[in-house]
Image (cartoon, rainbow, N blue to C red):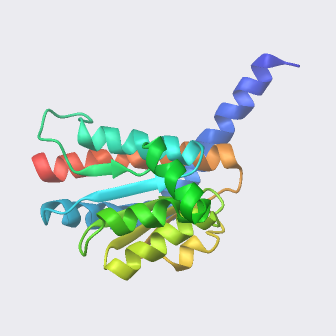
Amino acid sequence: MNFRRRIEDSLAASAYVKLLLLQRQAEAIEGIAKALIRTLRGGRKILIFGNGGSAADAQHIAAELEARFLKERRALPCQALTTNTSTLTAIGNDYGYERTFARQVEAYARKGDAVIGISTSGNSPNVLAGVKAARKLGAVTVGFTNEKGGKLRGLVDHCLCVPSTDTQRVQECHITVGHVLCDLIEGSLFG
């Protein structure tokens, strides 16, 4: 294996998808940012969830908003629904894995909150169920997915559809957009 060539190919592929993201999804990202800013300005909260790498992204984004991103400022109400193992395993055991996020959304989401479901395929049953529960409660819904969007695309108010179906490239863009959103939120709310 030629390590140098593999490194160059991987980084070039990542950069290429991010350039496509800029060209094709900047307007969608702006819409998501404005919706999240309205949510926070209105004294509401953001709930975020996904599976596997998307769960890690949910936790990462929530930490940037709860702690800080670039500015010293007050904590912002953003909760990842992927962190409480007792809750996740209790719901999975009692209601089935598909309900792990929906039950938590039912517990915490209120009208005017924002709920972000992350699914690389756009078809994760528990993410779809969580988004459906959020819609029923009157929350603003956001999806992060791939270029096809899966079922998630049609369920949400705002959808980020990364222009790729390569899981690693899609996930790289999800966290990049998460950072862009954190920057826009801090800049808008705290100058």
| Nearest to the observer: residue 123 or residue 6 | 123
Say left or right for 133 vs 64. Answer: right
Return the residue found at the far right. 1
Q: Residue at x 68, y 41 (%)?
A: 13
Q: Residue at x 43, y 74 (%)?
A: 133
Residue 181 seen in this snapshot: no
Say left or right for 142 vs 8. Answer: left
| Nearest to the observer: residue 99 or residue 57 | 99
Q: Residue at x 38, y 65 (%)?
A: 105
| Nearest to the observer: residue 24 or residue 66 | 66
Q: Is residue 73 above or below residue 136?
A: above
Q: Is residue 92 above or below residue 11?
A: below
Task: Name the quadrant containing residue 103.
Answer: bottom left
- Residue 14, percent across and down? 62, 40
Residue 78 seen in this snapshot: yes
- Residue 110, percent across and down? 26, 71
The number of callouts visible is: 0
- Residue 187, percent across and down? 18, 47
Say left or right for 148 vs 188. Answer: right
Task: Name the quadrant containing residue 152.
Answer: bottom right
Q: Residue at x 62, y 56 (%)?
A: 120
Q: Is residue 49 above or below residue 52?
A: below
Picture quarter with the N terminus: top right
